[in-house]
Image (cartoon, coloured by chain):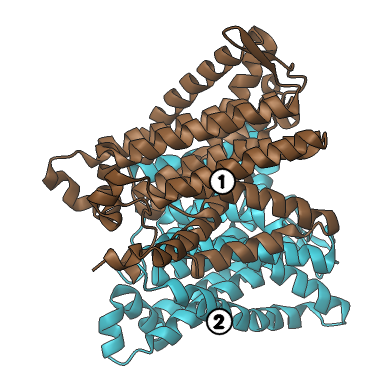
Amino acid sequence: MADLIDYLQFVLAPQALNGLSLGVAVVLMALGLTIIFGLLDVINMAHGEFYAIGAFLALTLAGLGVGFWALLVLVPLLMLPIGWLAERWLIARVFHSRDRHILTLLLTFGLGMIMEDLLKLVYGPNTHRPENPIEGGTEILGMFLPNYRLFLIGFGLALIAAVWVVVFRTGLGAMVRAAAFDKDMASSLGVPVRRVYAGTFAFGVALAGLSGVLLAPIYSVFPTMGRDFILMAFTVVIVGGMGSIQGAVVAGLLLTQVQALSSLYISPVWSDPLVFGIMVLVLMVRPQGLFGRLGHA
Amino acid sequence: MPEATLRTLSDPGRAGPVSRLSRLAPVHWLALAFLAVALGFAAVAWATGNGFYLRLATEALIFAGLAMSVDLLLGYTGLLSLGQALYFGLGAYVSALVLRDVAPSFWLAMAAALLAGGVAGLIGGVIANRVKGVYFALITFGLAQVAAKTVYNTRALGASDGLIGIPQISIGFGPLSLDTADPLSFFLLVLALTVAAYAGLAYLMDAPFGRTLAAIRANEKRVPFLGFNAWRYKLAVYVLAACVAALAGALYPMLRGFVSPELMFFETSGNAVITVIVGGVGTLVGPVVGSLLLTALRSVVGSWTEHHLIVVGVIFMLSVIFLRKGLVGALLARLGRRTGQGRTTP
């Protein structure tokens, strides 16, 4: 019995908490992706690069002496115009063609490629390691946890709740949901659909940038940092249901737990094939994912 | 003109039945012109004794085979595959294993790769064709990721290092034989195979099979009302594309002497999609032209900066926005205007 408790306390629980901090971060990324898909039908292949840009912006601004707390506000604000312009200049151009699913996927894929190379051009291919803004750790139930991870879990959960409130409990969110359900009807009722589109894309991009700021102190910062992370976020969005907010949250927390706990039993190198296998299975059996789409109740 | 996007260019509906009978479609003339240029290049490279560029051109043709298989799905059937590298890599690994461990026989390696590509394509096709649209793109992507990561983790397949030391072979054609170690003869062989693949696939796409695929692309829901089973056709073209990709992949270890898991990664699949879009979607010759142009571009730009992705990315995005039918499509439209063919469209 004591063995079992020890096992739970010293093996399972720390792994589960590690998984939770990763899970919160993945959910933040997946939220941006899923909102953009739910409203605009766009698979944003450049999302990982927006995340990387957020991390590098934080690095540069921190070098200029901006404090961590200011970064949490400043970086998303700087990402907003980038997202807005990307939607207006690129997505909107092909939005009304018949193959917009494929065309927007290709455009964001190209955009991601360019942004990744631009980051390499500006910052070089090396890995940067930002300072940990919150030092120290706390002992909870006999487990030692870094304070920053605890902050990440708390802040991330608060942010997820805030996104939920904005989308489901404000007039702005109602406009977004109305446009996602029926853009023509929403437009005739006076919703500025084009601005809602650009604004939502910018919002998703800002969330990605914010995830970059939050994760930079844990994972290092390098130009291709978005790649591995985005695959996980995509899987989460697919399993949860493309365009579903609660789906992204549930699937994000669930899949990162699967990844974290499975790595106790199988070699961690196999956790990627496992997660992608789950993604393929869900696509086969229930392509709409676990939950319904944004605006479609 | 939104309905004109991603549209087949060798569509006889535009050329009219008479012109189709009396002469080759403009797209085939373009292919012939391209072949002449390729042969001219081979002659120059041979005369100057430049093996490096011959090998580079051979590699471009091999990746053109992969791009053609993407074009079969995207250009003719309207299915975007983001995981075609799975079959390319499979062909490469099977060919490498046969050449290294079984027998140094070209024909055996190609047959084994074809068989593996066909079987894997059948399995992957049954899985991927359960869903449509962007879900198809994502499921092909996921399948390729699972396969690539599995190969990457498998010690017996060389894990992250891949397989090295694939022997160079001599390929027998009855009394004649050629050596893969000789850049010129291997280039000519791959060129001949590319031409054969182009001719065979272009013929098939003009046959009732290809017409049905075009119908699926145009409006899948109506196809069953015409008495065709859309699912079967989509599965068939998926298997066909997998076989083409596997055969192209089988040539890779003969050229380079090694295979690595990178051949299966998303970069390879993504590059094939870029090649098709830049070259010309739904033309079959576009992927070949695109592959050679992009390889040349990477090698030129790569000689003065390592940031060739920016250049390729910009060209790719401009193609998506402005040249919906790629370079070949733009060229054909221009030729069509000059010969008055464009005016036959009502």
The quadrant in which the C terminus of chain B is found is bottom left
Say if residue A29 shows up in the picture. no
- Residue B248, given in percent of the width and then of the height, sits at 56, 31
Q: Quadrant of residue B86?
A: top right
Q: Residue at x 24, y 50 (%)?
A: B18
Choose between A196 and B188: the one closer to the eye.
B188
Look at the image and give the colour of chain B: brown
Can you see residue B51? yes
Helix, strand or loop under label 2 = helix
Q: Mark 1 points at which residue?
A: B34
Q: Is residue A260 above or below residue A238?
A: above
Whether callout 1 and callout 2 share a subunit is answered no
Marked residue chain, label 1? B
Residue under mark 2: which chain is it in?
A: A
What residue is shown at x 37% (from left), y 45% (from top)? B24
Residue found at x 25% / y 83%: A185
In the image shown, does B120 or A31 lie closer to the viewer? B120
Q: Amino acid under label 1?
A: Phe
Residue A160: x, y in percent?
53, 70
| Residue found 74% across the figure and 24% down from its top | B257
Residue at the disc numbered 2: A84
Locate the N terminus of chain B and report the quarter of the image it occupies: bottom left
**Which three-letter amino acid code belongs to the residue tagged 2?**
Trp
Q: Which chain is cyan?
A: A
Task: Answer whether labels 1 and 2 touch (C-beta < 8 Å).
Answer: no
| Front residue of this view, candidates B6 and A215 | B6
User: Alpha-carbon neighbours of circle 1 within 10 Å: few (<14), some, or many (≥20)?
Assistant: some
Asked whether, in this view, residue A252 is left or right of residue A39, the answer is right
